Every structure is written in structure tokens, then in C-alpha cells.
Image (tube, rainbow, N blue to C red):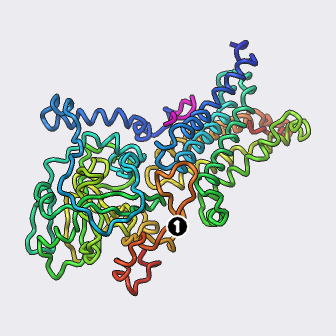
Amino acid sequence: MLVKRSSGLTSADVTPKHIYMNRRKFLAGALVASGSALAWGKAPAYLGASPDEPRKLSGVSRWPGSTTEPVTSEQIVTHYNNFYEFGTDKTDPANNAKYFRTSPWSVSIEGEVKKPRLITMDEIMKLAPLEERIYRHRCVEAWSIVVPWIGYSLSTLLRQVEPTSKARYVAFQSLYDPAQMPQGKWAGIAFPYIEGLRLDEAMHPLTLLCVGMYGTTLPNQDGAPVRLVIPWKYGFKSIKSIVKIRFVKDQPPTTWNNESSQEYGFYSNVNPNRDHPRWSQKTERRLGGGLFHAQIPTQMFNGYGDQVAHLYAGMDLQKYF
Amino acid sequence: MNAILTSKWTKAALFAICLIPFGLLVWQAAFHADLIANPAQFFEHATGDWTLRFLAITLAITPLRKILRVPQLIRFRRMLGLFAFFYVCLHLASYLWIDKYFDWRGIWADLHKRTYIIVGFSAFVLLIPLALTSTAGWIRRLGGKRWRALHRAIYASAVLGVIHYWWLVKSDISKPVEYAVIVGGLLAWRIGAWVRGRKRQLPAPGASREPAPARMP
């Protein structure tokens, strides 16, 4: 990467403090690494310990519905991330999530359910056989990747708690631990990150409860230890590092919709006919294509229309975007 | 000090330094293209950043000359301004070629629908006459006063450039804010200098009612 800071100008005296501080992302990361280490009460071991490396997953079956398109390189998928809790540059999460602690981990499932429960990561891993599903993944920023995710349908988990008849939506929440995610302070969006799906979307067999990719558990920067992958929606719907799932009666608020409701709708289905106010959604850049490659056309529902279009029958997708 | 500032070698060295970012980009494109996940974004952002930096450096020359009392700095201003133009051309080329791959319909749609692209393109267009009239011959032909008036378009171009950046980021505005503070500061200094110049030239009571027009530095 090129040197990012400009000029020999001295503007320190007029630069607002929080921006001035932002230059020291790196230093802040180091400080927090030591800070949270102390908080955990075993500083030397933690600082000396190697980061949580992804573990190889065995007994993963191939899912028959995978796309046959070339899979994007793991290097790109692990070094080009939007995970604003760890910084807003694409390369920030790979650097800043190294020491993110993902065990022990549990997910609270609550709200309009007969059997609310706190489920541990070990239980999640054993709840159903793991499948490798190769999905197209389309970011709202008009780039896309093809990823071999590992997991099983979210519906398997949701059925465990027996939703009541009042449950019409499902709200999801990511972990937000400012001690481990100091860069989140400068992200410009409110945390914890929250997302939501209509119940039928959440129960759809394509909606993946994802615990791994490329044959291993999830790398921290890709949403360890457990995330959603909803292949027909823009990437930001596929919430990372989930700690809470809540069944609710009314449409829940979602992070990007809260930030800018004109730009990011609740549904956020991939739709080439509905441009983002600031850029076109008609085409996308498939990452890893090298320097000079034309963009490719974006498909309605990211190409999963046959399976999901019926969920939105009769709805005006310009209005419910 | 004076010898260094007026040496032709200093100018040559500065020229070479200004080419370093370009060299690094070429080097990355040639040998490490596979490591660049999103080449369009990478080259657009890098060349856009360098355009704004060179605009800011160019705008800093006059304040630095006055504050540090080193009038010789003027020797470098044209070259720095032309480097800003060089990097904005690369920026536009990255957009047209790597990003849009000469998809003229898509480009046209962008141009009349995307505010930040309209703003950025306006900033570019404003710089064209400045680059064209940067020669000594053109200064003579236009006359110093008109030439200076024309070249004040760089103020508008820099402001539009910062707005262009500000409007394209999703939520973390810290980098556009940095540029806004720097460009804003450099323009504020000019306004301050202009106001001071006016005050100095205001007639004493009873003197002629027609003060000489103050000159924007």
C-alpha cells in the first residue's frame, strides 16, 4: 500500500482530536491488545499466545446446489472485508481482528419462542451435519465474490426454540466489545450491529447459519465464530459474529437502514433495477479478476430468483427495496 | 539555502519525487496485480488521494512563501500543479478504463445521475484550462492579472475535489474531513491575507475615496 498520509503540511493544530487519533489506528490496536489482555487477567499468556487460528473442519458434505463458477481466492476473501467494528478500510479487519476472542461463545435465542435458550458454539457445531455451499456473495458496493461457506440452514437452529404464532420477524445482533474493537469508535455507524429478516426469509433453506469457509472454521475477520449468509441479499444483511437472535412481532430496526434509510432498505434484496442513490447496481466487479476485466451484469436476487422470488410475490420491490 | 532553492537540480529532484507514487502504482500493477482484490477501487482511490495531496501542496506554496519568507518556492508551484493534473488524469483513466472498461452507456448514466461523479468531473474540467495555460507564453498572452484570475479556479477545483471524496464514502468520513481541514485552512489563510490587504489599503479619513483594489493572493 502506498503511504496514505498527505504532504508536509502541519495541520495538527486545527485537526479535530478524534481524527487526529484515527491516524493512530495501529497504535490504538496495540494498546487495546494489551488493554484487553489485562482485562482478561492473563496478560503475558494472552499477548504471547498465537491468535485463534481457523481449525480444519471434518465430515463436511458437499451441497448439491453449489454454483460451478470459479471460487474467489481465500486470500481475497480474508483480506478484503467490511467488518466496521474492526475498521473501515477493507484491509483493516484482517489486521485488527487477529486477537479477537471467539471462545467461549454462545448465542442467546429469545423473544417470541416457547423454549428460549442460550446455545453454546459447541452445541451449534453439532446440531446438524455441516455442508459446504458455494454461493455468490454480492456486496451493496457493487463487488462480488464466490465463497465455499460451511454450515447448515438457519431454520435447523430456529426450529429448536419453537417460535410462537406471534413471531413474524427475526432480529440478529453482533457482538460489540469496544475493548476488542477499538476501531469501531471511528466507523461512523452505531454498534452493536443489528440485522433482521422476515420469518419466512429466515426459515428459507438457502439462509445459511455459517460456521466456516474454505474447509476451516471462520477466520475472525469473516465473522467468526458464527454468522449468517443470505445469498440473494446484499452482503451487509449477512450479519457476522452473532450473539443474539430474537423473534419479534414487528419489523426490527437494522444498522444500515438506521444510518441511511434512503440508501439501504430493510429487505436489501440484490436488485439490478433499483440503483443505490449514489451508484449503479446494474453491474458488479467480481474480485480476483485481475486488472482489466469488464464488470459483469448483476442478476435479480443475485441469481437465486428461482428459489426466493415467491417470497416477494406481489410486492413492489422499488418501494420495499 | 538560497542556492539549494534556486538550483535546477532541486527542481529535477522534486520532479523525480513527485513521480514516486506513480512508479509505485505501475510497479504494483505490473508485479502484484494478483494481490489487489479490487483493482478499480485501488487505483481510483490511490490516484484520487494523490490528486488531492498535490492540489493541497500546490495551494500551500503561496502561504509558505509568505509565512516562511521564501519567495523562491514559487519556482516549484507550476510543476506541483501540473502533477495534480497528471494524477487527476490517471484518476479519470482508472475510472474509464479499469472501473468502467469504456462502458460509455454506464459512464453516461453515472455522469448525469451520480452527484459525486458530476462534482468530481467538474473539478477535473476546471483544471484543464489551468494546465493548458500554465506556460510562460500563456501568462504573457493573457496578462498577469487575467492569468491570475483564471488560475483561481484551482480553489473551486480543490473544494469540489474534497466534496467528491466526502460524498462517496459510506460512513467513515475521517479522511475527507482531513482534506477538508487542510484545503479549508489554506483557503482561509488567503481570505485572511486578502482582508488584511484591504485594511492596509483603506484610505485614511479625508484621503481619496478610491482605494486600489485588493489582490487575492
**Is residue A25 something that shows in the picture?**
yes
Q: Is residue A313 magenta?
A: no
Which chain letter goes with mark 1?
A
In the image, A317 versus A146, the foreground residue is A146
Residue A304, position in %: x, y?
Answer: 38, 73
Residue sitting farthest toward the bottom = A314
Going by the numbered disc 1, the residue's amino acid type is Pro
| Residue A72 to residue A166: above or below | above
Query: Dot 1: within a 10 Å radius of its alpha carbon, few (fewer than 14), some, or many (20 or more) residues?
Result: few
User: Which element carries disc 1, helix, strand or loop?
Assistant: strand
Does residue A149 appear left or right of residue A188 in this picture? left
**Is residue B185 something that shows in the picture?**
no
Image quadrant of residue B131?
top right
| Range drawn in magenta | A1-11
Image quadrant of residue B101?
bottom right
In the image, B17 versus B115, the foreground residue is B17
In the image, A295 versus A60, the foreground residue is A60
